[in-house]
Image (tube, rainbow, N blue to C red):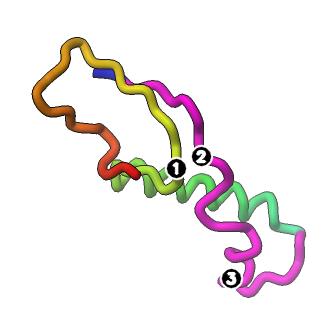
């Protein structure tokens, strides 16, 4: 069984503006770093939980058709 990403996530689970409000940052000087940290934290969380945080489309390829298909990414929408 293997998967292939068809359509990746659009955006990040948290906006830079939301993060800046939470962190009480008012300047725009660190926007790129904040965006990078949000992306890194999202990837870590997805890997740790074995779930995707945002909607994505995958193709699942099976060598044979089993009686029950267990998806590798947890619950789906």
- Measure the alpha-carbon separation of dots 2 and 3: 25 Å
Pointer 2: what residue? 9
Determine the residue positioned at 89% across, 68% down. 29
SS for tag 2? loop
| First in residue order: circle 2 vs circle 3 | 2
Q: Foreground residue, 16 or 11?
A: 11
Q: Is residue 24 magenta?
A: yes
Query: On the image, numbered disc 1 is attached to which residue?
Result: 55
Task: Please report contact status of discs 2 and 3: CB closer than 8 Å, yes or no.
Answer: no
Q: How many marks?
A: 3
Pinpoint residue 76: horizontal percent, then vertical percent.
36, 49
Outermost residue toward the bottom in this view:
24
Start and end of the magenta stretch?
Answer: 3-28
Q: Label 1 to label 3, Cα distance in Å?
A: 26 Å
- Against 29, residue 21 (above or below) is below
Q: Residue at x 52, y 43 (%)?
A: 56
Checking the image for residue 23, the label placed there is: 3
73 left or right of 9 in image = left
The quarter in which the N terminus is drawn is: top left
Q: CB of mark 1 within 8 Å of CB of mark 2? A: yes
């Amino acid at each position: 069984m293997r998967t292939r990403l068809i359509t990746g996530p659009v955006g990040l689970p948290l906006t830079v503006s939301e993060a800046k409000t939470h962190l009480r940052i008012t300047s725009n000087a660190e926007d790129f770093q904040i965006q990078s940290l949000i992306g890194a934290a999202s990837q870590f969380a997805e890997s740790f939980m074995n779930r995707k945080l945002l909607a994505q489309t995958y193709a699942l390829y099976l060598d044979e058709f089993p009686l029950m298909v267990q998806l590798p990414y947890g619950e789906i929408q």
